[in-house]
Image (spheres, rainbow, N blue to C red):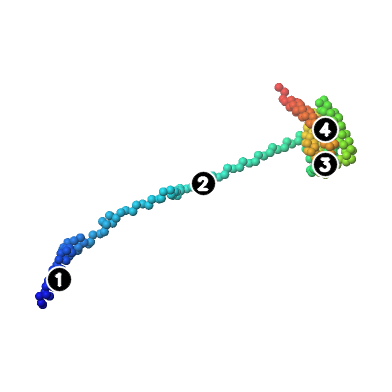
């Protein structure tokens, strides 16, 4: 080896020595994480410290303006309230039955009344009132009842004549409706009055029938007035209404007196 070669080798050795000293301790020295413990191998330190040092994630915060979640309902929901019971419809009062010995009020027939049917019904009513009043004059012992019967004959005979004149002027024949039950009712009522005993029993039966009959006739007149076609028929109805109303008021007044007399007669002696 010549002198130049030897010098190069020495230079390389010197450079390597300096590099080792600058790189840090040798493997034989203790260092964190080394295995140079003479008593045995030591496991490297767990990364727990690093994990502990890591920042903890902050809980998520809802953005401003967001509605808060409604918590789910807990417990048993309340039972639905049943609807209130509908009160039963009011029952109309029962019709008052007719007094003993008096026929029920008739129907004057269904359908639209005409001048001929109106005049026929008025004639039937007038004839019936005259016939009943004649029976009352024969059987009644009450002065008020007899006076009332006289007035019935006078007033209803006059109204019947007026109806006959109107029918003649219009050249019509009074014909009742096919289903008119007024005639049958008046016949039955006349038979009941004829069979009634003379005296207070007859007076009561007769006056009770008069109240009922005049209520029926007054209702018929109110129904007939707007249905009449000719002015003469309308005038006949208009003239008859206040007379029938006056008879009804008189019959009711006598009825009150007769019922009061019956109550006094039935009262026990003191």
Q: Residue at x 25, y 59 (%)?
A: 46
The Cα–Cα distance between marks 4 and 3, rounded to whole angstroms, is 18 Å
Q: Quadrant of residue 129?
A: top right
Outermost residue toward the top in this view: 270
In this view, the residue in front, 146 or 15, is: 15
Residue 184 in percent (x, y) is at 82, 40
Q: Residue at x 23, y 61 (%)?
A: 44
Q: Under tag 4, what secondary structure?
A: helix
Q: Earlier in the sequence, mark 1 or mark 3?
A: 1
Q: Under tag 3, what secondary structure?
A: loop
In this view, the residue in front, 51 or 268, is: 51
The Cα–Cα distance between marks 1 and 3, rounded to whole angstroms, is 153 Å
Q: Earlier in the sequence, mark 4 or mark 3?
A: 3
Q: Which mark is residue 239?
A: 4
Residue 128 in percent (x, y) is at 84, 35
Q: Earlier in the sequence, mark 3 or mark 2?
A: 2
Q: Residue at x 86, y 40 (%)?
A: 174
Q: Under tag 2, what secondary structure?
A: loop
* Residue matched to label 3: 114
Does residue 107 appear in the picture of this structure?
A: yes
Viewer-nearest of labels 4 and 1?
1
* Residue matched to label 1: 12
Viewer-nearest of labels 4 and 2?
4
The Cα–Cα distance between marks 2 and 1, rounded to whole angstroms, is 100 Å
* Residue matched to label 2: 79
């Amino acid at each position: 080896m010549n002198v130049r070669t030897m010098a190069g080798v020495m230079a390389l050795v010197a450079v390597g020595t300096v590099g080792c000293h600058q790189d840090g301790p040798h493997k034989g020295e203790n260092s964190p994480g080394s295995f140079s413990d003479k008593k045995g191998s030591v496991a490297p330190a767990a990364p727990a410290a690093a994990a502990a040092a890591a920042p903890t994630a902050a809980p998520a915060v809802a953005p401003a303006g967001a509605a808060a979640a409604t918590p789910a309902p807990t417990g048993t929901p309340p039972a639905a309230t049943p609807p209130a019971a509908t009160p039963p419809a009011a029952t109309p009062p029962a019709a008052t039955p007719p007094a003993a010995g008096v026929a029920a009020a008739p129907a004057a027939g269904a359908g639209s009344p005409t001048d001929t049917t109106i005049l026929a019904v008025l004639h039937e009513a007038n004839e019936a009132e005259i016939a009943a009043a004649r029976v009352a004059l024969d059987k009644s012992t009450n002065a008020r009842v007899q006076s009332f019967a006289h007035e019935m004959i006078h007033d209803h005979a006059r109204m019947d004549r007026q109806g006959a004149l109107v029918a003649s002027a219009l050249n019509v024949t009074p014909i009742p409706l096919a289903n008119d039950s007024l005639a049958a009712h008046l016949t039955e009522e006349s038979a009941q009055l004829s069979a009634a005993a003379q005296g207070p029993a007859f007076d009561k039966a007769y006056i009770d029938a008069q109240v009922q009959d005049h209520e029926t006739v007054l209702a018929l007149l109110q129904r007939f007035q707007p249905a009449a076609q000719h002015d003469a028929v309308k005038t006949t109805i208009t003239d008859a209404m206040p007379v029938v109303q006056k008879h009804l008021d008189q019959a009711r007044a006598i009825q009150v007196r007769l019922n009061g007399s019956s109550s006094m007669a039935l009262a026990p002696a003191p």
